[in-house]
Amino acid sequence: MTMNSEGGRCVSADIAAGVSPAAALFHSLADETRLRIVQRLARGEARVVDLTGELGLAQSTVSKHLACLRDCGLVTYRAEGRQSFYSLTRPELMDLLASAEQLLAATGRPVVLWPTRPTTQEPAS
Amino acid sequence: MTMNSEGGRCVSADIAAGVSPAAALFHSLADETRLRIVQRLARGEARVVDLTGELGLAQSTVSKHLACLRDCGLVTYRAEGRQSFYSLTRPELMDLLASAEQLLAATGRPVVLWPTRPTTQEPAS
DNA sequence: GGCTATCATCGCGTTATGACGATGAATTCT
DNA sequence: AGAATTCATCGTCATAACGCGATGATAGCC
């Protein structure tokens, strides 16, 4: 039974420990919700509550995903008062996503991955 | 209950259908075995039996992973006689892996992912 | 002080996933 | 033909993972 120190978050923490960091990295991006979180954070900080609203998911769900991303070192948070502002830690992550986008484009699938409309878009609130 | 046309392979096929191709892509790379397969194929074609031996896994297991990678369009096979020679379909995949490697390196984890001998690479068998 | 908002965790139920062995098809060898 | 090899699928089992609500901690607000 695998149990990372903090409780059964997702396998990432375990894997990241040493088994296969790459698998862990990809794993953390293999979930649509986390992917959306990453995309969102790419446009700027966000609180859990923001993400909860934008994603339409329960707060606990969002928190857990953020924990997963934290375990992988992809995001951090800046605690301010009682709220945490999450943000990406690695700019290189966007390179990775860009590579993925390119690959998908080459694969010829109907993909519109990153709306690439950062400025025009209006965050929920 | 999700069942792709061919049977419950892995979620990739379903996802790739339209939900989130990116998640599907990352998902297919989120497993260490599949990752190893990809690394192996990066060095040249391989049969199922070869991979079975090198990975130390059951033939059915390897076949299933290959099916998963096929569903994602990452690999193809060239049937010859009764054996199938699998190979990568997308060179861009290595760019993706390179990005991942770079990201992991930046993360500061002790990672030696791809033996890093890409261009000079020498086919195994 | 009491109340509410924000967030991290825990526990739970449902579904997905990975590994295996068994089966059957196609192919090659004797 | 008969046997063996290669491989795809199927069925099954154990575990991981996603989503949710509940709980508790901390921090602002009346």
Image: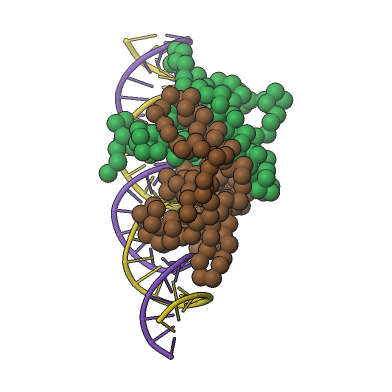
Chain colours: A green, B brown, C yellow, D purple
Left or right placement of residue C7 versus residue C22 in this view: right
Pinpoint residue A47: horizontal percent, then vertical percent.
51, 22
- Kindly indicate the quadrant of the structure image that contains residue B86: bottom right
Pinpoint residue A63: horizontal percent, then vertical percent.
44, 30
Q: Is residue A66 visible?
A: no
The residue at 35%/34% (across/down) is A18
**Going by the picture, which residue comes out furthest to the right?**
A120
The residue at 48%/60% (across/down) is B47
Q: Nearer the viewer, residue B50 or A113?
A: B50
The residue at 59%/21% (across/down) is A44
- Kindly indicate the quadrant of the structure image that contains residue B59: bottom left
The residue at 50%/22% (across/down) is A89
Q: Nearer the viewer, residue A76 or A56?
A: A76
Residue B3 position (above or below residue C30): above
Q: Nearer the viewer, residue B97 or B119?
A: B119
Left or right placement of residue A19 versus residue A118 in this view: left
Left or right placement of residue B71 versus residue A12 in this view: right
- Kindly indicate the quadrant of the structure image that contains residue C9: top left
Pinpoint residue B125: horizontal percent, then vertical percent.
47, 54
Q: Is residue A72 visible?
A: yes
Residue A80 position (above or below residue A76): above
Pinpoint residue B91: horizontal percent, then vertical percent.
61, 44
**Number of residue marks:** 0
